[in-house]
């Protein structure tokens, strides 16, 4: 049939024979927010994949104000001496002590060391002129024996101050509590029996 001379007043609603080649995708109902104009000043660091192997030890609650002193360069002694010797002599002999007039060795040692014990066995071994002379010379203030006398009493060995007479023991056991006469002074070895470190020839 011949076409109409003019379009129809109401075109037919017939669909197309096929859809359009690329239909428009529907827009999102709520569009996303516009991006920021610049990145954040300090972006967060990515987390570690595992915990640290050895966490830091907690610091001390109250650190000291000054560092500790360095240790001594030499090997320190394991135990301090209980009673340091008084007035050591230049030759290293330290333990023979000369008592006062009419004083016992117990009183002499108590005043010098804090203990009234004396090693009477060592004192009793001063039984020759050579030994008493050695003991007299080994004091912090050495004495000289001008003469010698053997005495069989419990307050030997001793020194007679007015004439320099040295008395040595002839066998009687020395007694720590025995006093001398007013003109004599006892040679005392301080320390318990077996612990008096008093040299004797």
Image (cartoon, rainbow, N blue to C red):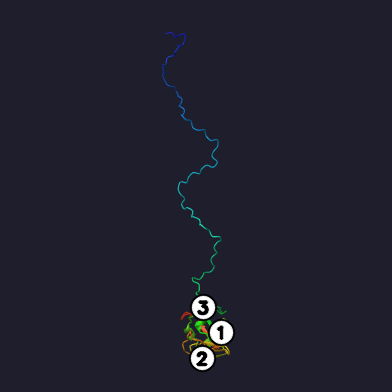
Query: In what element is the residue under mark 1?
Result: helix
The residue pinned by badge 1 equals 137
Q: Nearer the viewer, residue 57 or 159?
A: 159
Residue 111 visible? The answer is: yes
Counting residues from the start of the chain, the first of labels 1 and 3 encountered is 3
In the picture, residue 98 is in which quadrant?
A: bottom right
Give the answer, above or below, for where 143 lies relative to 9.
Answer: below
Mark 1 vs mark 3: give the one in front.
3
Q: Position of residue 173 (x, y in %)?
A: 46, 87
Mark 3 vs mark 2: give the one in front.
3
Query: In what element is the residue under mark 3?
Result: helix
The residue pinned by badge 3 equals 113
Counting residues from the start of the chain, the first of labels 2 and 1 encountered is 1
**Gap in Å between the C-alphas at discs 2 and 1?**
18 Å
Q: Nearer the viewer, residue 49 or 197?
A: 197
Q: Residue shown at 53%/91% (left/top)?
A: 149
Residue 150 image label? 2
């Amino acid at each position: 049939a011949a076409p109409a001379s003019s379009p129809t007043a109401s075109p037919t609603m017939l669909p197309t024979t096929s859809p359009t080649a690329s239909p428009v995708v529907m827009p999102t109902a709520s569009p996303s927010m516009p991006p920021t104009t610049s990145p954040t000043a300090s972006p967060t660091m990515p987390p570690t994949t595992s915990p640290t192997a050895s966490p830091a030890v907690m610091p001390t609650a109250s650190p000291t104000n000054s560092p500790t002193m360095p240790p001594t360069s030499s090997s320190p002694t394991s135990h301090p001496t209980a009673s340091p010797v008084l007035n050591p002599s230049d030759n290293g002999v330290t333990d023979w002590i000369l008592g006062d007039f009419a004083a016992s060795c117990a009183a002499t040692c108590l005043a010098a060391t804090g203990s009234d014990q004396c090693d009477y066995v060592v004192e009793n071994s001063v039984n020759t002129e050579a030994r008493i002379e050695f003991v007299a010379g080994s004091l912090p203030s050495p004495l000289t024996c001008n003469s010698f006398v053997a005495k069989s009493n419990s307050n030997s060995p001793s020194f007679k101050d007015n004439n320099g007479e040295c008395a040595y023991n002839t066998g009687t056991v020395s007694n720590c509590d025995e006093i001398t006469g007013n003109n004599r002074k006892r040679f005392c070895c301080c320390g318990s029996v077996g612990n008096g470190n008093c040299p004797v020839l």
